[in-house]
Amino acid sequence: MFRKAFTLYADQIAMPDTIRKPFCAELKRWDHSPRDAAKVAEKYLSTFDFTWPDGLVFLREYQGRRGTFKQLAALFAGCVYSKHRFFDQFEMAKRTSRAFPNLILSRGPVMQSCPIHGDKEGIILPVYDNYWQEYPLRESVFCRCRVRQTK
Ligand SMILES: [Zn+2]
């Protein structure tokens, strides 16, 4: 699942195939050390040629907030981890869906509502509802949404 999360964001910045494997493997090791993870991200992101405004989707969006290269690298790592954790949480929710069949969607620790899920804040849907597939959480840098499992 880590690989899947990594690939999702690697695709968004058109990362060359040649660095994906080593980058992914190294990043995976630093899940609980954001500073080291950011350093790894910085190292690999600086090896390929792109311009922040043109080559990127999500980082370009973020650039509006004047992120430095360092911050953007940290952001990349953070997005991958966050998506990875969400995959795990979702798998767990499936396993325990008999006792707790629903998920409640809430806004994460942010002021603004999510551009993707904002209109559905507070909604309660079954774990297996298509909504979660059609509008997956944590696939944009602006999505900080959370779900909690409930009866
Ligand atoms: Zn969201």
Image (tube, rainbow, N blue to C red):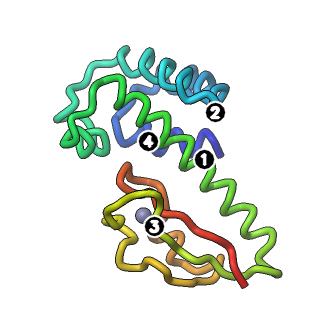
Q: Amino acid at mark 4?
A: Tyr
Q: Earlier in the sequence, mark 3 or mark 4?
A: 4
Instruction: Give the residue at mark 2.
Output: 31
x 54%, y 47%: residue: 82
The verdict on label 2 being within 8 Å of ligand 1 is no
Measured in 3D between alpha carbons, the distance from the residue under mark 1 to the one under mark 4, in whole angstroms, is 11 Å
Q: Quadrant of the C terminus?
A: bottom right
Measured in 3D between alpha carbons, the distance from the residue under mark 2 to the one under mark 4, in whole angstroms, is 16 Å
- Crowding at dot 1, Cα within 10 Å, few <14 / some 14-19 / many 20+, comes out as many
Numbered badge on residue 84? 1
Q: Earlier in the sequence, mark 2 or mark 1?
A: 2
Measured in 3D between alpha carbons, the distance from the residue under mark 2 to the one under mark 1, in whole angstroms, is 10 Å
Q: Earlier in the sequence, mark 1 or mark 4?
A: 4
| Residue 63: percent from left, percent from top | 22, 38
Instruction: Give the residue at mark 4.
Output: 9
Measured in 3D between alpha carbons, the distance from the residue under mark 3 to the one under mark 2, in whole angstroms, is 23 Å
- Name the front one of labels 3 and 4: 3
Q: Nearer the viewer, residue 51 or 122?
A: 122
Whether label 2 touches label 1, CB < 8 Å? yes
Q: Earlier in the sequence, mark 2 or mark 4?
A: 4
* Lateral position of residue 125 relative to residue 96, left or right: left
x 58%, y 27%: residue: 27
**Disc 3, SS:** loop
